[in-house]
Image (cartoon, rainbow, N blue to C red):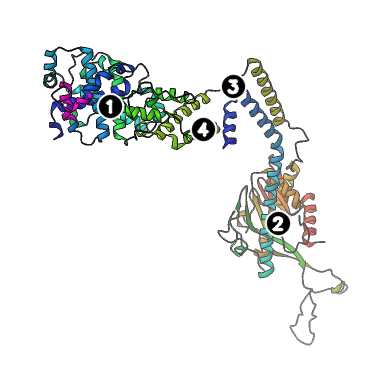
Amino acid sequence: MARKKSKGSKKARARKARAKKSAEVEAPASTPTEAELEAPAESSADPTVEPVGAGEAPSEESAPSVTPKKKTAKKKTAKKKAAKKKAAKKPTSDEEGAAEKTPKKKTASKKKAASKKKPEKAASAAKRRSGNSKAAAPVVTAPEEAPTEEPVVLDDVDEDLADLVAAATATDDDIVTITIDPDDDLDDADARERLIAEALAFVATEEGEAVPENAPSVESTAPSEAPGSGDAIDPETASTDLDEDTAAPPSTASPDEEGASDAADSGGPKITAQALLALSEIHAEGLASLPEELILDLGEATTSEQRDRLLAAALAQVEMQDAVYRVSADTSQTRNIKAGIAIGVLLIAALVGIRPPGLLVPDPPASLTQADRTQGVRVALLLQAQQVEAFRVQAGRLPNSIAEVETSLPGIRLVKSSNRLYQLIAYTSEGEPIVYDSEVPAPEFERLRREWSTTRDGS
Amino acid sequence: MDREGAVVMNLRQLTRSDVAIGAAVLLLIWAAAAPTLSARSFRSLSERASTDVEALRAAALGTVASTGAWPTAAEAGTAPPELSGAYPGDASLTFDGYTLQWVGLAVTDYEEAPPVTYVAPDPDEEGDEGSGLIIAPGDAPPDSVGPEMRAVARQIGAVVLYTRNDELLADLLTRYGTTVSYVRDSVWTLVVDDRETSGQP
């Protein structure tokens, strides 16, 4: 059913969005026309008086979700925009008469001629951007998307550009009926981008909570900024305001803009004590990390406190990035001296590692000598001879092989020379054979046997 | 938090030269302390090995004293079933850096044989040839002959330690001496005899 809204209503909604955004962005240019706008704004209730106003009335009726205060503000800004456009173009009476026909005509021709790709592209791009702006850290992305140049005057672009903005901000149902003629003068890409960005900011504020009108907003400090336009955040302006926070905040709102005057009267953009405290904590922590509570989505910054936090986070992020690249630069002479010291210490370390001084080396542990290993072979042969003798005592004969003995030590070979005599042969680690002859054991074995017996007998 | 932040900032301001100096100093400290640390580590290993060897030896001797039999031989790294009380759990004798094993050995002892008694044949009985040694007339009397010795086999045991650390082998050899222990290849063996009264490390 929403798709079947009247084309005039769609157009009016687009104008409303454009007018609201122009009220945010448009600055001093709108000031001279305030007097002119006063009368049409007052008479906006009568749809027959003003062609533009006639298109506006149903659009407001078709937006019941807007609060009365907002509706009034939007109506005012839309009227101002329309009147301004009218004054700029100076339309003739014929043109005024045709003004009512224009939306229908354009919509009809657009539906045929222009493809729907452009609005869909714009809508998808808008969704992407809005999604990105919510997903990514706002303190980083916000300054890139926000306009940093002169305020954009909507008069510089065609109405269809505003339609494009409306298409970017509208719901899927609205996108169907809003088309753009590619032949129109939409050649100003920068202006188009800025408008889309502003429209996204507008959408973000629309989705957020309603802002108290008397709450001090960061945006409201901009000179001659419209009231109620503090829903969107201009990081460029915000940072400037923060820098000028110590000075007297400008309050140049028009007298008829009650919201702005309220904001200005309340002291303008001041970073709250909480935000300053958070910022000081960031500084105290060496800007190593950004507190979680300071990370805020741009679209969620609806209150002044949140904006202040966002601002503090942005500044902290900048300083954090500066700190990362803040590396002390050594002079070449200092570098050379340090390099020489490093090389010298390295050489000393290598020397100590290769040949440590005796002071640093404790008593070395005992090491095996060749005599120890040879002695070990002899003891093993004697022990194996004991096994063979034990076998002979038990079995009454010599074993046929060393494997027949209950316990056979590795590396020892048994050679039987007769039924009563045998030899045991083992090799040292150097390959030298050592033989134990059962008939005439070597003196080393006899000595070892005596020592062993003495030891075992305890005598 | 302030201190941590200051430390982070100081670390970020370090240059490569500073890092090189720091690394060189650390290397020097390590080179100077390495011998002491290594010796300390080896002393710890040697103490642990000696303690484990003594525990196994004491358990085996305790078994002999209580049951009169030596523990049965077991595979390397596994305690004999008789020593399960001393090594509860999985009874593993595999330790960090070495493995223990209990083996059974047999030795031959020579002991005095019982004296031979001479029984002269009874002349009144026919066919009685007597018993014992037949000593021809004029020979020395039987009691003048020295005691006869005979070989007797008996069981002992040994604690075997397997390790690739030659320093540990040498240290154990130094501790227990070269009489009751010996080293062959990468094996150190300690003979455990219940009759020994000396040779303790």
* Left or right of residue A136: residue A452: right
- Pointer 1 chain: A
Q: Are marks 3 and 2 on the same chain?
A: no
Q: Give the secondary structure at mark 2.
A: strand
Main SS of the magenta part reads helix
Q: Is residue A50 magenta?
A: yes
The amino acid type found where label 2 is placed reads Val
| Quadrant in which the N terminus of chain A is drawn | top left
Of the residues tagged 2 and 4, which is closer to the observer?
4
- Pointer 2 chain: B
Q: CA distance from mark 1 to mark 4?
A: 33 Å
Q: Which mark is residue A328?
A: 3
Residue at (43%, 33%) from the top-left corner? A309
Q: Which residue is mark 4?
A: A282
The amino acid type found where label 4 is placed reads Ile
Q: Which residues are magenta?
A: A41-59
Q: CA distance from mark 3 to mark 2?
A: 70 Å
The amino acid type found where label 1 is placed reads Ala
- Pointer 4 chain: A
Q: Height in image: A442 above or below A143?
A: below
Q: Is residue A419 visible?
A: no
Residue B66 in percent (x, y) is at 67, 70
Neighbour tally class for label 2: few under 14, some 14-19, many 20 plus, Cα within 10 Å: many
Q: Give the secondary structure at mark 4.
A: helix
